[in-house]
Image (cartoon, rainbow, N blue to C red):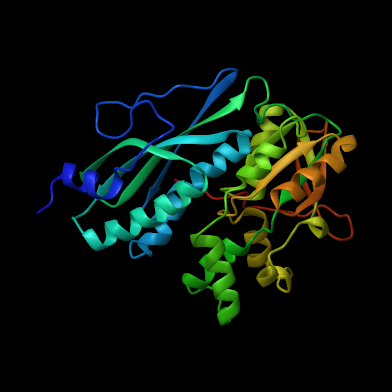
Amino acid sequence: MASEFDLIARYFTRPAPGAVLGVGDDAALLTVSDGMSLAISSDMLVAGRHFFADADPCFLGHKTLAVNLSDMAAMGARPRWATLALALPDVDETWLAAFSAGFFALAERFDVDLVGGDTTCGPLNMAVSILGEVPRAQALRRDTAKVGDDIWVSGELGGAAWGLKHLLGEIVLDADEVRACLTRLHTPEPRVALGLALRGVAHAAIDLSDGLLADLGHILTRSGVGAEIFLADLPVHPALGAHLHDPLARRCLLAGGDDYELCLTAPPQHADAVCAAAACAGVSVRRIGLICAQAGLRVRDVQGQPLNIEVQGYDHFAA
């Protein structure tokens, strides 16, 4: 039976040209570029909480890194290095080969070096710490939204959560809808290029992991402001579009989570620059509301009336 060190050498040791020293020692050695700040983020994915235990391991490898790349995108940081800690219930080399293939395919796309980590026996979960670089004083943050800013969202919302409802048996989608929604759920596309293009354009940003209302709420809390958003202006995933009269569909759109799009604020005079940044990154953006002085987050329907929204977003400690 393969040892921990055999598994690391076989599946997770790759050249790390961006590091002074990568996998194989007690710690990696890294050098940050001149004039840059180091951006660091960590995320954990746990079987039964964040994914089904029988999830496709290649897709799971992709998503394990993608959710961390999304954090770098939200900071306007260029991802550089990552560490990976894996707990495995047993040694399944077929599973490991597929997981590492999904992980490294995405890592290579974004020039991210895996420079360390750990493996152990235990309930299936994986934790990534990612490190990136951003020019000093240019990081996109949650605490810098300004009254009068427009609120923007990239891509489309609700598809991943709608696909999860299908997997849970709460709705039934047709084959094309299943394919489109599960692609969003299992292999999210981190908006790194958009985050880089928004440096000096956006005031504040966050990635949408737990749902639009919850994540935008973090910006409002940290910035000490309020917001109004308009249901009719939200970029809705096509599989969800015809169902917004259904409270479940509306909840997926506003609070479903797993979108991994960027939500940002920017002054109105930067509207053209936001659109240009999105065009440069090859992603769509929509203006969905505005930052205001009155505390709280209000969602207005197509008639302009406030909606009563009870569920704000995904709760990692909810039953």
Residue at the image point whose x is 76% and y is 43% from the top? 277
Q: Quadrant of the N terminus?
A: bottom left
Q: Classify residue 194 as left or right of residue 86.
A: right
Residue at 21% over, 48% down: 7
Measured from the top left, where is residue 34 in percent x and y?
Answer: 56, 18
On screen, residue 115 above or below 193: above
How far across and down, in percent of the image, does residue 144 sit? 72, 27
Q: Position of residue 260 (x, y in %)?
A: 59, 50
Q: Does residue 159 appear to the left or right of 318 in the view shown?
A: right
Q: Nearer the viewer, residue 151 or 49?
A: 151
Given residues 242 and 56, the one toward you in this image is 56
Residue in the picture at 22% in, 59% down: 93
Residue 30, can we see it? yes
Residue pushed farthest left?
A: 1
Q: Is residue 47 visible?
A: no
Left or right: residue 164 versus residue 20 is right
| Residue nearest the observer in this picture, 119 or 162 | 119
Residue 276 vs residue 217, the one in the foreground: 276
